[in-house]
Structures are given as C-alpha cells and as structure tokens.
Amino acid sequence: MIIKLGDHLNVCKAFCSASEKNRLHVIKAKENSCERLGGIYFRPHSWLSILGAIGLIIFSLLTSYLGWALCPFYSLTAIGHKEELFQNVLSQVAEQFSRAFRINELKAEVSNRLAMLEKRVELEGLKVVEIEKCRSDIQKLREEMASRSHRSVAVNPSFLDDSKKLTPRRDVPSYPKYHLSQETVEALRKPTFDVWQWEPNEMLSCLEHMYHDLGLVTDFSINPITLKRWLLCIHDNYRNNPFHNFRHCFCVTQMMYSMIHLCRLQEKITQMDILVLLTAAVCHDLDHPGYNNTYQINARTELAVRYNDISPLENHHCAVAFQIFSQPDCNIFSSIDPETFKLIRQGTITLILATDMARHGEIVDSFKQIVDVFDFSNEEHVTCLKMVLIKCCDISNEVRPTEVAEPWVDCLLEEYFMQSDREKLEGLPVAPFMDREKVTKPTAQIGFIKFVLIPMFETVEKLFPEIEEAMVQPLRESRDRYEELKQIEDATREVRATPEGYDPKPSRDCETVQQTLYGNLF
C-alpha cells in the first residue's frame, strides 16, 4: 500500500475551517515540489512511497503531531506555527530514515568484523594444529634419540658446555686451507715445534695435514670433507679452560705425530695402530670441565656417579668422541667395515682411558716388564706400548724448549688453583700440589719431572734410543733449571725473613716432600 502526503491533507480538510483549508491548499500545491526537510532534499512521492510499512510509520507520526488536522476540537491559532510543526515532523522522519540507514551500515560493519574474527579464529586454529604436530614430531625425535642412546655409548648433553657443539658444521670449507711451507712441514715433525705461534684455524690445517701425510686418508678412504667437519666439531667440543683446551689437544697430537716420525713407528706397527694413536690423541680430553677426577669423585658429580668413580673424565672423553663419530657428517670411519671399526673403537677407548694419571704406575710398570723382550708382533706388547706413548705425549710439555714449555706451567697452575679454591669453598679435600698457598712453579715441576717424566721417558728410550737427545735430555735440563730456581727462591725467602719471624718450615728436604706428594698421586 502506498500512502501519499496529499491523502493526509485530504483527511485534514474534513476537519478544518475555510481559512485553514486555504492554507492546506498551499501545502497541497507543494506536494510535487522538492522540499528541504531536516537538511536533506527529497520528493515526497519518491521518499514516502518506498514501502507501505514506512508510510504507515510516517502516518502515525503525522497523526501524532498533526492532531489539530484530525481532531475538530483542536484550535488552530497560528498557521505559521503549524508549518513549523510540520517541518519539525518531517525533519524527525528524515532523522528516523537516517538512523535506519546508520543501523544498516553498523550491521554491515559488525557482520564484516565477525567474518574477519571467524577467519582469524580459523587461522589460529590451524596454527594450533601445526604447533601440536610440531610438538608431536619433536617428542618422537626425542624418543628416537633416547632409544639410540640406550643402544650405544650415551653422553648426557646436559653436561656438555653447549648442546649445539655436537652438531657438525656443514659450511665446508669452514676454515681456510693453509698452504704449509716446507719449513713448517719439517718443524711439525719435531718435538721443538712452537705450538703458541698458531691460531685455531692454522692448528686445524696442521691436524688435517698429519692425517694426509701419514697416509691415513688414503688407506682408510677418509672423505677429506668429512675430515674437515670432524676436526671442526672436535675443536668446538674442547672448553676454554686454562690448560685442558683445544691448544692442549693440538700440542699432544703434534707430539704424537713427532714421535711417530722420530721412532719410525710406521715401519714397526700397522697403519691401524697409527690411526688409533693419532685419533686418540685428538680426542683424549674432549669436553674436559677443568676439574680433575679427584674433584669429580669427592664432589659426587654427575660424571662420578655415572661411571662409578672409575676414571669418570676419561670415560666421558671417550663417550663424547664416539658421539661425534655417530654423526654421519663427522664419521671419518664411514668407509671402514664394521669389524675394523670395532677394533679401532676399542683401541681408541683403551688409549684414552690410559691417560688417567691414577693408572700411571700400573701402566709404566707393565711396560717395564716387557721392554727388554719387546715383540712388535705381539698384540699385547704393542697395546702396552701405545698406552705408554699417549701418556708420554699427554704430559710432554717439559720436553719442549723453555719458551714453549713454561707458559704451559702457568696455565696448569691456574687450573689447579681454580680447583683448589673451589674445593676449599665446598669443604672438600685439597691436594697439596694444587694449593696456591703451598705451591710454586719450581716445587710443582721438580717432583713431576724427576719422579714421573724422566723415569717414563727413560723406559721408552730403551726401546727407541733415538728419543734420548730429542726428549730425555731436554727433560734433564728442565729439571736442573727448576732446581736452580728453587734454590734462588729459598735464598730469597731466607734473606727477607727476620730472625724472630722466620720459621723454616721445610723440616724434610725438597726431594722427600715431592716423593710424598707424587707417591700419593700415583
């Protein structure tokens, strides 16, 4: 149904006087014109005939405000006021339309926002699903790693300095390939080699050269790229301790390399033995924490508990070494058949475990018993020799020239003092040769050289006389030098002390004290 403004005016005429009807005729004349109502222009027919429902609303509003037209009892006193009232009514009608349109716009905006929110909820739901899937995959990987660790030699990553360390580097070449001069190649084969003059990348190149020079890369089909990755991973798994660090690893390996050449071992033992000697030297102190076995056992550390107080550090070094080998990108033995790998693994473990100084007396005594009747075809003899050789290399710093050896003493004492300080704080026993209040450089070295190094190297000299000049004689000279330094220290202390305040504590001679210290150690 369509209701026009004219229809309402006709209804009004029925109840109006003649003069009022004239005024209504004026309004009727404006029906087809465009009026400005409430600030907007509209044609009454076109706006008020939109829908029957809207017309009814307008009609109700008009009748409520124009009761004077519909009610004969209403008195029209001022036509101007009626026009103004009519204009107000139409303005309110326009306002109602405007509100209706605004509500529609608001509804549309709310609908759009709801749609966007639904889409976001859907996307977030997908993300949650992906996160749960990732978590599930991670859990599966952890379970797989745990099952593998139970089937093989396991190392608790929590003890490692950085869990990332065991992850091999894949950016090969990761360190520059240095061209070693002939002079460097020759120097590398001698015990006098200065290990302090080389940066880590250069040391890695030197280690790589050793494997190539000894023919190990060719004989065991070692992938050169894998060798690089393995050496980088080895470097990353040595901690920045004052003494037991990667430079110490290089120092020991270089001494082993020099002994292989000096003693012409490749003419006497197999290439597999050479591979085991060099590889054990590289791996022998992996992830050393800077505190020795005595501390591990007394402090009841995780390692001591895991390995039942039996060479906890050395067992840990072995475990880390073969965890690295378990990485395909670092497995230099990947081309070796399982039986050969088993022999290499057992040989490497045997040598690393032999570096525990608590076994020093046992191993040296065993070698002394066979050295006079040594047989290179006897597997047990060769194994005992390899154990002694890695021990010699591990503690061989005093074999080197003084300018190379002495900085190592400072590094070792720093690590000793760090441990003894911690032992005092924790109320643990402190070894006398580690106590900063009782040890000096001469007193630390004299006993070690006289009662540990010289006897062991002199035993090896019986089998390889060629080491006498290159190794044994430098040890004797080092002993004499430290004894002179100790005499100077003693004399200086006596001069500085007053007769009343100075109490010469050494009631026993220096040699007796040192025998007691190192006798208890071994």
Image (cartoon, grey):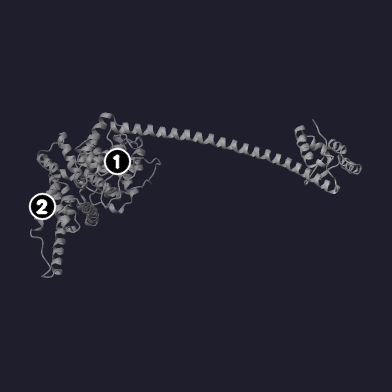
Task: State whether residue 405 appears in this view.
Answer: no
Q: Residues within 10 Å of mark 1 (few under 14, many from 20)?
A: many
Q: Residue 215: x percent and y percent?
A: 28, 38
- Per the image, label 2 sits on a secondary structure element best described as helix
Between 284 and 294, the residue placed more toward the observer is 294
In primary-sequence order, the first of circles 2 and 1 is 1
- Residue farthest along the left direction in this orientation: 508
- Per the image, label 1 sits on a secondary structure element best described as helix
Task: State whether residue 281 appears in this view.
Answer: yes
The N terminus lies in which quarter of the figure? top right
Q: Decide: is 350 above or below 418.
A: above
Between 70 and 403, the residue placed more toward the observer is 70
> Residue 281 sits in which quadrant?
top left
The structure residue drawn at horizontal position 17% and vertical position 37%, both measured from the top left corner, is: 383
What type is the residue that disc 2 sits on?
A: Thr
Camera-nearest label, 2 or 1: 2
Q: Decide: is 396 above or below 127.
A: below
Label ID, residue 516: 2
> Residue 273 sits in which quadrant?
top left
What type is the residue that disc 1 sits on?
A: Tyr
Real-space CA distance between mark 2 and mark 1, rounded to the nearest whole angstrom: 42 Å
Instruction: Please name the residue that numbered disc 1 is placed on.
Output: 211
